[in-house]
Amino acid sequence: MDFNVKKLASDAGVFFSRAMQFTEEKLGQAEKTELDAHFENLLARADCTKNWTEKILRQTEVLLQPNPSARVEEFLYEKLDRKVPSRVTNGELLAQYMTEAANDFGPGTPYGKTLIKVGETQRRLGAAERDFIHSASLNFLTPLRNFLEGDWRTISKERRILQNRRLDLDACKARLKKAKAAEAKAAAVPDFQETRPRNYVLSASASALWSDEVEKAEHELRLTQTEFDRQAEVTRLLLEGISSTHVNHLRCLHEFVESQTNYYAQCYQYMLDLQKQLGSSKGEIFSGTFVGNTESTSPPAATSPPAVAAATLPAVPTIPVVPTIVGVPNTVAESVLNPNEVKPPASGTRKARVLYDYEAADSTELALLADEMITVYSLPGMDPDWLIGERGNQKGKVPVTYLELLS
């Protein structure tokens, strides 16, 4: 118990001494040991790294999980050292709703079929998003979080120790300075006004006491200087390790960019596939809708092409339409709609810019490359969602949704 009381008293004395030194430094009444310029640069670089790492970490978490409630839940699970439960992504939830709606509307109806196709694409998008979030969290967020919760805490701890060592050193310097000033005063101004031997003995005794105090202060100064130099070297080594941290974060950043690139490439490919499916089946769906209505006694009205195409795209001379008989091929229509045997109109063809890459499904279609220019025109009897495209000696059907018609 006696040892604990002594230790408590000693710690209180050290704390009081540091508090006084810190206060006097702030008030400009005490000298402060300054660190060298290289050390100050290391400290500034470390603080900058810590601040920007925190900002990047928080904003990346917002990017991966925009819902603040979900982020708080994940944070609590992480602090409790428990596994975060699997959460359905928005795309997967949308896919579930579309599938259920298709089952209610009828999976065989045009709307139901389209809902199923779009829902499947949304499910694939949601799965890709889940993989991206997992990859980004593992390869990018975890290293940043490990730095803030590991290396930076160690650096901060050693910096606090260095700060305490510096305060102790400056306090020892102040005590030594005061002791030397008192010793010089005692040696230079003895009590000569009174000639009694007693006063002379007291003066000599005070000078000796201040000499002992100076020696004691010098010894404490040497000890605190050694501790300060040792702690400064330890802190310097940790601060120089920030360069290795930058190299590691750079590697993690490359992995994050690669994961994000793969994610967006997958999404782009999924949407292209969906667009092809919808573009190829759109005409069939609408034609199936009209043909399936057998209760109508009048023949179905001919569907007109989109307003832009009808107003600006020329058509070749009208060819009589031969009624289609089940089991008998419509040779006239087939010959008209065969792109390789069709000649373009004499004038009025239009230029179009390709918006997306398109792979030809068969020999009657023309493969497209994004941003290329082709010549397009329409033919009577064609699906309004398709045009005839020409590029040099190549010719074939192209979907309108992949084109930007130019004036």
Image: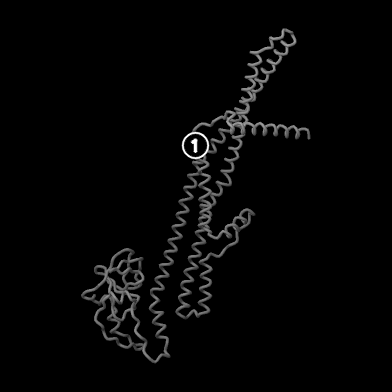
Asked if residue 8 lies left or right of residue 272, the reply is right
Q: In x, y percent, where is residue 322?
A: 30, 87
Query: Residue 220 placed where, x, y %?
Result: 64, 25
Q: Residue sitting at 51 percent across and 73 percent down? A: 98
Residue 80 x/y as whole percent:
64, 54
Kindly identify the residue that appears in the image at 39 percent across and 92 percent down: 297
Q: State which quadrant residue 303 falls in.
A: bottom left
Q: Is residue 249 above or below residue 235?
A: below
Q: Residue at x 69, y 31 (%)?
A: 13
* Quadrant occupied by the C terminus: bottom left
Q: Nearer the viewer, residue 214 or 91?
A: 214
Q: Quadrant of the N terminus?
A: top right
Residue picked out by circle 1: 41
Q: Amino acid at mark 1?
A: Asn
Relative side of 1 to 164, left or right: right
Secondary structure at badge 1 equals helix
